[in-house]
Image (cartoon, helix red, strand yellow):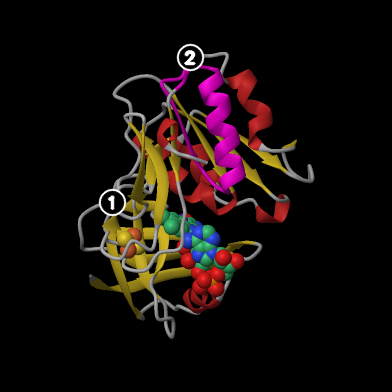
């Protein structure tokens, strides 16, 4: 646990905020998360690491309820109780290109992943509409190419990120990583499977302890043919899509 100084707090898209803290703990890996105690909320709120650079850790989150509304009130200089980095992140293939797919706030961990892949990432980011598009420039700086889709066509391609996958996957990819709404992750995992490409999904569930102790976050997976309950906070949040029982 660490009391971190907030260094920046900004609205970056409709209802989407970026929050940076000074980070003296272990540097996070792409796909790991932090568990933040928001003012007034009993439980911490898990948020993926979006970026880490030079002792500054940044998360990007959608304001949804009590916890994220409280986080939205944070101001530079204030102390914030942040636990992390937690969980198992993405396994980066040693060679080959990786297709990253982010949906909405699920685009956040893709910045960290694109940076770690240093030029080996192609990225598809999907949003509800133009005013929800975030992190496109930052990810474009780190990735080889970035495609934007919006549900209403107000920016980029009209439709879901899956629309672009068949064309992009004509080129060889070592892996597909996805984070976003569950239906998107399921559809992306199916397309990757159809193309014979290993896929890693970053699952989300409500959490309490965030460190594997309370079993609030369990999900059903398949390991060696047998059904197993796994903890999203400590066994994940990133899983091999082939193991997930949707
Ligand atoms: C490993 C992990 C990483 C995450 N990374 C991010 C991120 O980078 N950016 C981001 O915006 N959000 C992320 N989330 C989701 C985020 O934790 C929730 O949106 C947040 O906890 C909601 O808290 P709240 O108090 O604002 O909302 P609440 O009042 O608790 O809930 C508001 C609404 O959000 C739903 N909800 C709450 N928690 C979750 C959850 N964990 N998963 C799915 N739905 C939920 C509720 O069912 C309800 O409909 C992540 C979740 C996990 C588990
Ligand atoms: S949140 Fe407690 S075990 Fe995962």
Contact between labelled residues 2 and 1, with CB atoms less than 8 Å apart = no
| Res. 62 visible in picture | no
* Residue at image location 39% in from the left, 36% down from the top: 222
Kindly identify which residue carries mark 2: 172
| Residue 40 in picture, x, y percent from top left | 43, 86
Residue 199, compared with residue 23, is above or below; it is above
In this rendered view, identify the residue nearer to me: 68 or 5.
68
| Residue 234 in picture, x, y percent from top left | 29, 53
The magenta-colored residue range is 173-197
Q: Residues within 10 Å of mark 1 (few under 14, many from 20)?
A: many
Location of the N terminus by quadrant is bottom left
In this rendered view, identify the residue nearer to me: 100 or 214.
214
| Residue 7 in picture, x, y percent from top left | 37, 70
Residue 238 picture quarter? top left
Residue 148 picture quarter? top right
* Residue at image location 38% in from the left, 63% down from the top: 216
* Residue at image location 43% in from the left, 81% down from the top: 41
Q: Is residue 110 left or right of residue 152?
A: left
Kindly identify which residue carries mark 1: 28
Q: Is residue 151 magenta?
A: no
């Amino acid at each position: 646990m660490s009391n971190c100084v907030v260094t920046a707090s900004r609205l970056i898209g409709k209802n989407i905020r970026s929050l940076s803290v000074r980070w003296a703990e272990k540097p996070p890996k792409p796909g790991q998360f932090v568990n933040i105690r928001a003012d007034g909320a009993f439980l911490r709120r898990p948020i993926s690491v979006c970026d880490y650079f030079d002792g500054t850790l940044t998360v990007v989150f959608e304001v949804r309820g009590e916890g994220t509304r409280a986080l939205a009130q944070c101001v530079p200089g204030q102390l914030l109780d942040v636990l992390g980095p937690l969980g198992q992140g993405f396994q980066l293939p040693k060679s080959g290109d990786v297709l990253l797919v982010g949906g909405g706030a699920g685009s956040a961990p893709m910045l960290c992943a694109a940076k770690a892949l240093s030029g080996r990432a192609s990225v598809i980011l999907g949003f509800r509409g133009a005013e929800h598009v975030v992190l496109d420039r930052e990810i474009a700086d780190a990735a080889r190419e970035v495609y934007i889709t919006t549900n209403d066509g107000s920016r980029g391609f009209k439709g879901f990120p899956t629309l672009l996958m068949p064309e992009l996957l004509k080129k060889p990819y070592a892996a597909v990583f996805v984070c976003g709404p569950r239906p998107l992750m399921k559809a992306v995992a199916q397309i990757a499977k159809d193309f014979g490409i290993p896929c890693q999904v970053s699952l989300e569930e409500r959490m309490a302890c965030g460190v594997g102790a309370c079993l609030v976050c369990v999900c059903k997976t398949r390991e060696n043919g047998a059904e197993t309950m796994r903890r999203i906070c400590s066994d994940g949040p990133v899983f091999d899509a082939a193991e997930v029982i949707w």
